[in-house]
Each structure stands twice: as structure tokens, then as C-alpha cells.
Image (cartoon, grey):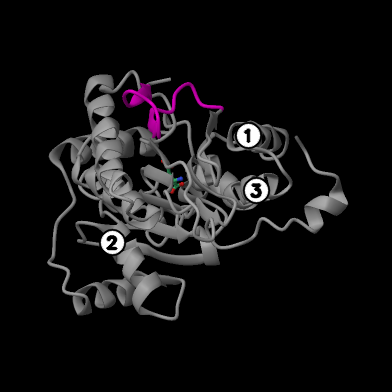
Amino acid sequence: MILHWREALENKNDTFGTEGGSALYAIIVHGGAGNIRSKDPERIEIGIKKAVEAGLDVLKKDGRSIDAVEAAVKVLEDDPTFNAGTGAVLTFDGEVEMDAAIAYGPNLDFGAVAGVKNIRHPISLAKKVMEKTDHVLLAGNGANDFAKLMGSEPHDPTTQERKKQWEKYRKQFINGDYKDWPKLRKLFQEHPEFLHGTVGAVAVDSHGETAAATSTGGVFLKFLGRVGDTPIPGAGTYATPNGAASSTGLGEGMMRVLITKVAADFLRMGLDAPHAAEAVMNYLDNTVGTEAGIIMVDRHGEIGFAHNTPDMPYAYFKEGMAEIESNMR
Ligand code: ASP
């Protein structure tokens, strides 16, 4: 039910958790949008279910959603099947530069890192930015220095599989057979000197607190220094007292639509997570029209998901369900 605009403006739901009461917990994770089934559906399904299990271990013990989404994303960052942490895609130059963000709904807290290298768990570094600094987003060398300060051991996330894909895509790109990046392709033709080279979880816990986490290597063949939607508040990741959202797809479109912020606004206006996810996808389709997918929870324990890509593998569990559900489409 959509509220009247005046009721929506005066919405009293922007409060912290359930003020001592108990709520239904729920978690949903995604393994990226695109054409996934052609890759390795079995490995993907095992991975996203394991991630939900890791989050549930936290939620079942009355733990906090912020720890549940971190635990879920860490599992996916360690799984080379996914474009986050180990197995992240390579830039045009053949390096791995990763973005990650975590958002805590009750007080709009946010921590993010952009363009970090040689880190095993970018999501945990993003959480440290939120908890240990007064900043929201650290990028590049500064973020890597902060990682060292926090005791992070160097870790090379490059896998042989990704390197092979990079070689193939780069060759196609240079030969003009790669369909993405039309503007960059032209730029490379005009300036040959340029030619040297996702996962998410959202949860609500038994205290009614919401949280979101997203981690990615970005997109294949991106420019060094390119930052996508993932670490930008309201673009790839967002949480408010009403709900939380994580998106996947072409960041350049989602940053312009602020897809997760708009989704959170729909929740505040009275939509539940399933309807808010559909409504925001419709908005994106009618505006930038780029490839995207979104997962959401609302404070009442409802989950939502929508995508305009052929697939977006996701897995979820809501309190009361017999087992984890997953969908590879
Ligand atoms: N949204 C990510 C980015 O553009 C990529 C993805 O979701 O696969 O960096």
C-alpha cells in the first residue's frame, strides 16, 4: 500500500530498530547480474547458498545484520567463481582493483573502499572504514595504507582463469569485436597511448536492524582508477531504518539512477521490499535502461529482488522457512 504523499513525508518509521521488540530476520545474497547460466551454475549455486548459511549463523544467534552481511560477502570473496576478492576481474592494464561497501540502516552509517589492491576481504576493510574512521569512502593508495594499518596481510586476488579471460577479451577489444564500452573503444582508437591497460548481501536481524554489503572487482577492461556504483552510497549499496539494498550490473547506469537510494525511498513511501525492487527496476528501465539487478530487505523481514538481465543468481532465507531457497535466473 502506497502512503499519501503527506503521510510519506511525515513517516514515523525512520526509527532505530524495533525499540526493544523482536522482528523476523531475513537475508538475501546475489552473485552478480548478467548471463550466468552459460558460466558455471552449479558452482554459483553452491557459493550463494554457503554465503546465506554464513549470514544465518549470525542471525540465528540473535546477531546483528551488519555482521551477517559481512560474513556472507566474505564467503563469496573467497570463492573464485565470483567477481569479488579472489577471482575479481582485471582492468585493461591487467591489474585487479576492487570496490566494496557496507551500510548500516538504523543510523545511515556507511563505509566503503574503492580501487583497492591485494586485499583478501575488501568488505571487511569497508567495515573498518565505517567503524574506525570518521570517513565514508577511502580510495586507492590511501585505502591500501589503511588496510596495512588495520593489519591486513597482502593477498593476490588474481586467478589463472581470470587472466585467460582477460587475454581473450583484451584481444577482442583491440580488434574491435567487444560489444561493451563503445565510447572507450573510440577513445582508444583516437588515443592509442591509452592502450596499455560482484557479490552482495542484505539482511534484517531479530532486532529489526537492516544492513547491506556489496563487493566487486568492477567490470572487465575498465580503466585504471575507474570506480563503479558499489562503493557509492545510494548507488550500489544503501541501508536505512526501513530497509537495505545491494545492486549489481553496469555501474555507470546505476550511479546515475542511484538505484538503492530510490529503492529505499520507495520503502519509506510504504512499499514493501518485493514491490520496491520491481518499481525501482521499472524506473531504471525507463531512464538509463542499462543492465541491472537488485536485492532488498525491508524492516518487516520481507525480501525483494528484480533484474533486467537474463540472470541474477540469488539465494535467501526468511525466518520460518524450512530451507534456503535459491534461483539461478
Ligand atoms: N556494479 C559493478 C560495477 O559496475 C559490476 C557488477 O555488478 O558486476 O562495478
The disc labelled 2 sits on which kind of residue? Ser
Residue 93 place in picture, x, y as percent: 29, 53
In the shown orientation, is residue 188 left or right of residue 261? Answer: left
Q: Residue at x 27, y 54 (%)?
A: 96
What residue sits right under mark 3 in the picture? 257
Q: Earlier in the sequence, mark 3 or mark 2?
A: 2
Residue 204, image x, y percentages = 45, 47
**Distance from Cα at disc 3 to Cα at disc 1:** 10 Å
Labels in figure, total: 3
Q: Which amino acid does label 1 sit on?
A: Met
Residue that mark 1 sits on = 281
Q: How far apart are marks 2 and 1 (CA)?
A: 29 Å
Residue 168 appears in the rendering: no
As rendered, which of 104 and 100 lies closer to the eye?
104
Of mark 3 and mark 1, the one earlier in the sequence is: 3
Q: Nearer the viewer, mark 2 or mark 1?
A: 2
Q: Name the residue under label 2.
A: 124
Of residues 126 and 225, the one drawn nearer to the viewer in this rendering = 126
Q: Which secondary structure is most common in the magenta stretch?
A: loop
**Does dot 3 land on a helix, a strand or a loop?**
helix
Q: What stretch is highlighted in magenta?
A: 308-327
Neighbor class of circle 1 (other Cα within 10 Å; few <14, some 14-19, many 20+) is: many
The answer to whether residue 329 is magenta is no
Ranked by sequence position, the earlier of labels 2 and 1 is 2
Which of pointers 3 and 2 indicates the residue nearer the eye? Answer: 2
Whether 59 is drawn above or below 42: the answer is below
For the point 29% across and 33% down, the residue is 48
Instruction: Please indicate whether residue 118 sits to the left or right of residue 222 in the image.
Output: left
Residue 172 higher or lower than 71, as above or below:
above
What kind of element bears circle 2?
helix
Q: Looking at the image, which residue is at 55% across and 30% down? A: 306
